Image (cartoon, rainbow, N blue to C red):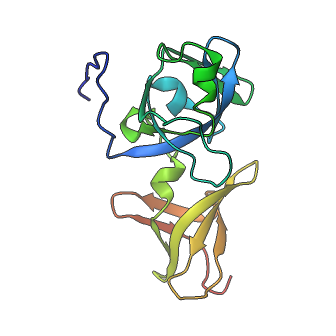
Amino acid sequence: MALTVVTPGDTPVWPSDAVEVGRILDAHGVRGDLKVQPFAAEPEALLGTRRWFLRPPATPGPQPVGAIPSFLQVAQVRRQGDLVVASSQSLTDRNAAEALRGARVFVSRASFPTAGTGEYYWVDLIGLAVVNRQGEALGSVVGLLPTGPHCVLRIQPAEPDAEERLVPFVDAFVDDVDQAAGRITVDWGLDY
C-alpha cells in the first residue's frame, strides 16, 4: 500500500473503497474531541486509521449548523466504553466538534485490519449470491443480524415479493464463502 503525504490545506480524494464505519454523536469535553458511535463491536477500522472521510447525516432531523468537511485528519483516537473518542488538530474547541454532530464516518476498506482465516467483514458478505448444496439459488445477502453468539445472514430471493430468508452464519449451515466467485454455499433448503 502506497503512503500519501497530506499537507495542510490538502484534501485527499474520496476513496473508491470507502466504507461507513460510524457516526459522530457529539462533542466530548471542551477541547474539540468527538464522541463517535462505531458500527462494529470491535471498531478496529476507526482505531487503526487517522484518515476519516465525512458525509452529512443521511436521516431526517436536526442537521449540522455548518458544512461538514469531507475529510478529517485524526490526531488521537481511543475506545471509551462502547464509543470511540477522537481528536483532531482542526477541531480547536467544543463548538467546532458540535458542528460535526450526526456526520457519517467512512474509512478506506484498504485500512481495515486483515481478517483471519474464516473471518469476514460484513461489508464483504453483503451482495454475495447464496446457493445451497444442490446448486439452487436462495438469493443475495442484503445484510446481517447480530444475535449475540453468532450472526444471521439476511438473504433476499430474486423473486419479487418473496420473503427474506434468515440463515445462521455458523459452520453447521455455511459450507463455503468464496469471495472471489461472489458466492456463499449453505446447507439450506428452498422450503426452509
Q: Can you tell which quarter of the image residue 2 is in? A: top left
Residue 46 visible within the image: yes
The residue closer to the viewer here, 96 or 143, is 96
Side (left or right) of 159 relative to 35: left
- The quadrant of the image that shows the C terminus is bottom right
Q: Position of residue 125 (x, y in %)?
A: 49, 57
Residue 85 visible within the image: no
Q: Position of residue 111 (x, y in %)?
A: 40, 32
Side (left or right) of 118 relative to 102: left
The residue closer to the viewer here, 18 or 109, is 18
Q: Can you tell which quarter of the image residue 99 is in? A: top right
The residue closer to the viewer here, 44 or 15, is 15
* Up/down of 81 relative to 23, above or below: above
Side (left or right) of 108 relative to 42: left
Q: Position of residue 105 (x, y in %)?
A: 52, 38
* Up/down of 9 relative to 1, above or below: above
Residue at screen point 57% across, 32% down: 100
Q: Position of residue 66 (x, y in %)?
A: 53, 35
Residue at screen point 62% across, 58% down: 144
Q: Can you tell which quarter of the image residue 103 is in? A: top right
Residue at screen point 62% across, 18% down: 33
* Up/down of 119 relative to 11, above or below: below
Total marks drawn? 0
